[in-house]
Image: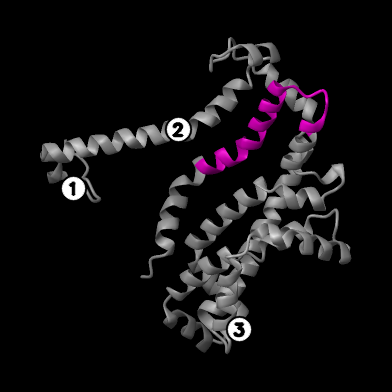
Amino acid sequence: MSHPQRTGVIREYDMHSPSVRAGYGVILFLCGIMVVIALFPLVWVILAGFKDLKEFVSSTSILPRSFDIQTFVTTWNQLGIAKNYLNSFISVAGSVVCALIFNGLLGYGLGILKPKGYGVVKKLVMLSLLMPTTISIVPLFMNIQKLGLGNSFLPLWLSYGANAMYVILFVQFFESLPSSIIEASRIDGCSQLQIFFRIVLPLSKPICSVVAIFAINAAWSDFLLPYLVLRGGELQTVMVRLFVFSTEQTVNADAMMRSVVFSMIPPIILFFIFQKQLTENSVSVGIKG
């Protein structure tokens, strides 16, 4: 039975050298240590959720005495987090749509249309990457209040529709597309919007998937802006609900651990579903073919 051909920096015939095999073993060992270090906090939080308060405070063992799933059910009911899950999904869905359409349109203009003065706009977008996002919170919140958009998901969606990093990713990918396809679409009578939605976006599935995954993760874990904008309890996202839950006097450390597990479930599921696509597309985004 033939073995699959080894690809990469270390090739199959390199493994015949003892020094290469030793180095390969060291690399695997170091990678294993990094994996353990990365996964330990996640595993610890999940296992700590199975402990009651007395065991959580007194026990030094990582493993709980019992794996009673009822403790998580009790905390779920205490949190009432089902509604907050729905709010977070609404926030994430709108954020992904705005991140793809608005940032994609600007990337289309800077990467393909390139009108007069596009270089200045591109430099301003690049310059905005140097500014911490926190400095824009106060003027952003004031504008939201003046426009009467408070206590709604719309400001959260639009904030992800103006992301400099996503624009740069789109520009780099669009510049790698064959110009002959764009010219052929123009000859066929397509307008610029038709070219973007019917030609460019379907050809940009790799970068769209990368931007979508980044936007999902960012929108799900965002706390500050939803906390400022969604003041009402009915529209609170999961992260805001966890903060409010942590301030309640009846909350114990073990219940807080279990609530944190609930917030980690969707990103973990997303990672396992799209991990291969995320790593492959992230590598290929900067490669112009």
Which quadrant would residue 41 be assigned to in this image?
top right
Q: Nearer the viewer, mark 1 or mark 2?
A: 2
Residue 83 falls left or right of residue 115: right
- Magenta segment's dominant SS is helix
Quarter placement of the N terminus: top left
Kindly report the distance in space between the C-alpha atoms of the residues bearing marks 3 and 2. 52 Å
Name the residue carrying label 3: 191
Total marks in image? 3
Secondary structure of the residue carrying numbered label 3: loop
Name the residue carrying label 1: 11
The range drawn in magenta is 245-271
Residue 242 falls left or right of residue 210: right
**Magenta highlight on residue 98:** no
Name the residue carrying label 2: 37
Kindly report the distance in space between the C-alpha atoms of the residues bearing marks 1 and 3. 50 Å
Q: Nearer the viewer, residue 177 or 145?
A: 145
**Magenta highlight on residue 251:** yes
Q: Give neighbour class at mark 3: few <14, some 14-19, many 20+ (Cα, 10 Å).
A: few
